[in-house]
Amino acid sequence: MAAATKATRVGEEVWKSRVDKVNAELVTLTYGTMVAQLCSDFDSNYAEVNNQLDKMGYNIGIRLIEDFFAKSGVPRCANLRETAETISKVGFKIFLNITPIVTNWAADNKQFSLIFEENPLADFVELPDDGKAQDELWFSNMLCGILRGALEMVQMQIEAHYVSDVLRGDDTTEMRITLLRYIDDEMPPDDE
Amino acid sequence: MSYYFTIINTRDAPLFELEFGTSKAGGDGAARFSPEARAMNPFIVHSSLDIVDELRWGKDAMYLKRIDQFSSSHISTFLTPTSIRFMLLHLPHPPNLAPAFIPSPGSYPPFTPYTSNPLSSSTSSASSSSTFKSSTSGAGSIANNPASPQTEEAIRLFFWDVFEVWIKATMNPFQSMEKVLGSPVFKQRVLGAGRKYL
């Protein structure tokens, strides 16, 4: 738990001193409008909307990770548990001012869940009542892509997806994250 | 008192409709409109929109108070800054005290604000007698008089509560000002405001 308390402290400190704040409603409305626009552009093909959000998130993540290290100055994580604590208590803290709960570890320590008690992206949102969105759309799917992109840049290939969302009427918002492998530095082919 | 509440957008299309009854003075929160009245309510409210348009430039407040009366139905209005109109039609019980309908030339067909049927007549008389008691006994409850200051104040509080939940509802990115507001959450909150103040 030492790692967790340390991460909490770092997150708090960076959030207080080194982060530019922006109005929460601006973020919420911008993100919400974008998702709504995607839904109308893809003609309510929510699987495709999820996919697009994930891609956008990926592109954010691969850039954001550098900024994250510059702001927080956290050292290399020794294992996935430490990584999870850092994601929750430093990463989410300084970018969204939330600290999702890290829980539901798989026995092999390669899989965990983030439970979001609050989600600034989804304030005010009610999913469209068309009988499909409630079952198919993951409104905050961009966050999955961001984690995937960010961790890929630090040699971790992960898979992230939502398993429940309060917007769909579930009790909690839960994201499941699986470590697939550590990416080894590979020699480019035909490099002598 | 029975209420018919509707939200009308800038193109005069209704976005939301709800009927409910008083919860004060032992009321059960159910609307008691006769079938004819129920059919007439949207027309009565719509005919008052012209009055709203006349009043809106002369007043600073969003709450325009009681602006119109048709037979024994009264209309109160709240006008948001973006010209969305909250219209509340309130029809007092008991019907036997309601003024008789006086048809004006070329007017709508007469309607009875209340027709007694075996199902609701007993509850109606019970609630009307208790309403009478409480209105004589003291302030705090809405008198069965749509023109009284208590009613005006209660409706003002109701409108402000609805305005707050309305703002939240319109912040939903999937909601547009041209679309009917079908959110069950919104409906529950409006009903809650109704229970609290009316």
Image (spheres, coloured by chain):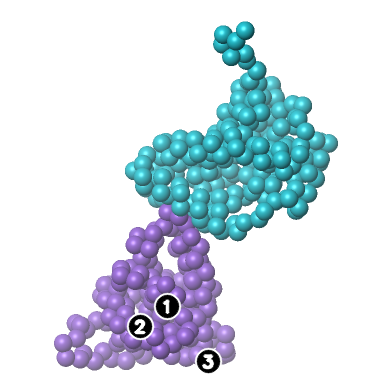
Q: Earlier in the sequence, mark 1 or mark 2?
A: 2
Read off the chain for label 3: B
What numbered label is drawn on residue B79? 1
Provide the residue designation for mark 2: B52
Instruction: Left or right? Give the position of A24 relative to B19.
Output: right
Where is residue A174? Give x, y as percent. Answer: 59, 39
Precedes in sequence: disc 2 or disc 3: 2
Q: Colour of chain A?
A: cyan
**Contact? badges 1 and 3 (CB < 8 Å):** no
Residue B122 falls in image quadrant: bottom left
User: Please, what secondary structure does the residue beneath circle 2 have?
Assistant: helix
Q: Residue at x 76, y 39 (%)?
A: A73
Give the amino acid at mark 2: Val
Residue B113, can we see it?
no
Question: Outermost residue toward the right?
Answer: A2
At horizontal 54% and vertical 35% (from top left) the residue drawn is: A58
Helix or strand or loop: what does disc 1 sit on?
Answer: strand
The amino acid type found where label 1 is placed reads Leu
What's the CA distance linking mark 2 and mark 3? 33 Å
Label located before the other in sequence (1 or 3): 1
Q: Rounded to the nearest whole Å, what is the CA distance between mark 1 and mark 3? A: 33 Å
Q: Crowding at label 2, few (<14), some or many (≥20) Cα neighbours within 10 Å?
A: many
Local crowd size for mark 1, using a 10 Å CA cut-off: few (<14), some (14–19), many (≥20)? many
Q: In the image, what residue type sits under mark 3?
A: Thr
